[in-house]
């Protein structure tokens, strides 16, 4: 199990980037936004053939809000050793609401009313867990390349800049809110094989050069859950055919 969540001062910097070594004992899986659909997703995960004793699951943020089981989803992600996640814009609003009432109103308007039903001690423990365990970005090493994981889009044209970047509020916003790269030029992100994001809420996955957005749950009713190796192979085949 992961370390016990303890309360802390929410003014501290968030984690900008983590590099995750290749899984030598099982498969790594990636999934888009889940928005509190905990029971549905656990059933989907079991049907997929996911092996919790060897496999790892990487989520792209926006675990909470809108769906019926945000608290259960967040606790599971924070307390389960084989589950990892980047921060999404919904987690950021949830965290900011612990110390800034104005952000509570914004979070509530985006489906965060469930947080009104938890006591403040638990609220602070959960926001602390998000800050301590969910980075803005991750690089996942795979057998045939690397995946860059970020909720909305890469904040830089060169993914390697993230390993040197210092935390700032504008950087957090750039990782979790905009999706201009979906609508912009078909320009690849250097320094990484593929960048994987969620956030945009489309019926099908969307690709631009070596970037892919897999937030399909809200529009299609099914999340996109795929192994990292299959995602890399599919994207690299598409790039070689362009």
Image: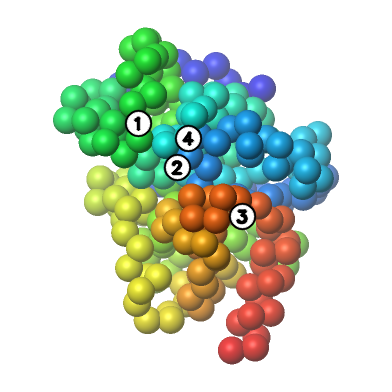
Pointer 2 or 1: first along the chain: 2
Question: Which numbered dot is residue 62?
Answer: 2
Question: Which numbered dot is residue 67?
Answer: 4
Asked whether the viewer can see residue 133, the reply is no
Pointer 1 or 4: first along the chain: 4
- CA gap, disc 1 and disc 3: 23 Å
Residue 158 shown left or right of residue 74 in the figure: left
Image quarter for residue 185?
A: bottom left
What secondary structure is found at the residue carrying circle 4?
Answer: loop
- Front residue of 172/111: it is 111
Give the residue displayed 32% in from the left and 53% down from the top: 177
Q: Which residue is mark 1?
A: 112
- Are the residues at dot 1 and dot 4 in contact (C-beta closer than 8 Å)? no
- Are the residues at dot 1 and dot 3 in contact (C-beta closer than 8 Å)? no
- CA gap, disc 3 and disc 2: 14 Å
Q: Nearer the viewer, mark 3 or mark 4?
A: 4
Q: Quadrant of the N terminus?
A: top right
Is the residue 45 above or below the residue 100 in the image? below
Pointer 1 or 3: first along the chain: 1
Name the outermost residue toward the left.
Answer: 102
Question: Which numbered dot is residue 224?
Answer: 3
What secondary structure is found at the residue carrying circle 2?
Answer: loop
Rendered location of residue 234, percent (x, y): 69, 72
Give the residue displayed 55% in from the left and 65% down from the top: 204
What secondary structure is found at the residue carrying circle 3?
Answer: loop
Asked whether the viewer can see residue 84, the reply is yes
Residue 46 shown left or right of residue 76 in the figure: right
Give the residue displayed 27% in from the left and 46% down from the top: 168
Q: Nearer the viewer, mark 1 or mark 4?
A: 4
Pointer 3 or 4: first along the chain: 4
Q: Quadrant of the C terminus?
A: bottom right
């Amino acid at each position: 199990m992961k370390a016990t969540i303890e309360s802390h001062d929410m003014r501290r910097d968030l984690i900008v980037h983590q590099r995750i070594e290749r899984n030598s004992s099982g498969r790594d899986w990636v999934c888009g936004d889940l928005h509190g659909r905990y029971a549905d997703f656990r059933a989907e995960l079991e049907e997929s053939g996911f092996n919790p004793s060897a496999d790892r699951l990487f989520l792209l943020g926006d675990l909470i809000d809108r769906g019926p089981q945000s608290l259960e989803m967040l606790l599971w992600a924070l307390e389960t050793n084989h589950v990892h996640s980047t921060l999404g814009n919904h987690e950021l609003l949830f965290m900011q609401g612990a110390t800034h009432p104005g952000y509570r109103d914004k979070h509530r308007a985006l489906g965060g009313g469930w947080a009104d039903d938890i006591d403040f001690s638990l609220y602070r423990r959960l926001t602390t867990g998000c800050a301590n365990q969910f980075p803005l970005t991750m690089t996942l090493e795979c057998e045939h390349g690397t995946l860059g994981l970020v909720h909305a889009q890469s904040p830089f044209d060169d993914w390697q800049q993230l390993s040197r970047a210092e935390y700032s509020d504008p950087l957090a916003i750039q990782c979790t809110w905009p999706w201009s790269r979906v609508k912009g030029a078909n320009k690849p992100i250097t320094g990484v094989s593929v960048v994987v994001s969620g956030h945009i809420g489309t019926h099908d996955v969307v690709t631009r050069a070596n970037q892919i957005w897999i937030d399909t749950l809200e529009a299609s009713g099914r999340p996109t859950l795929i192994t990292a190796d299959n995602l890399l192979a599919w994207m690299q085949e598409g790039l070689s055919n362009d």
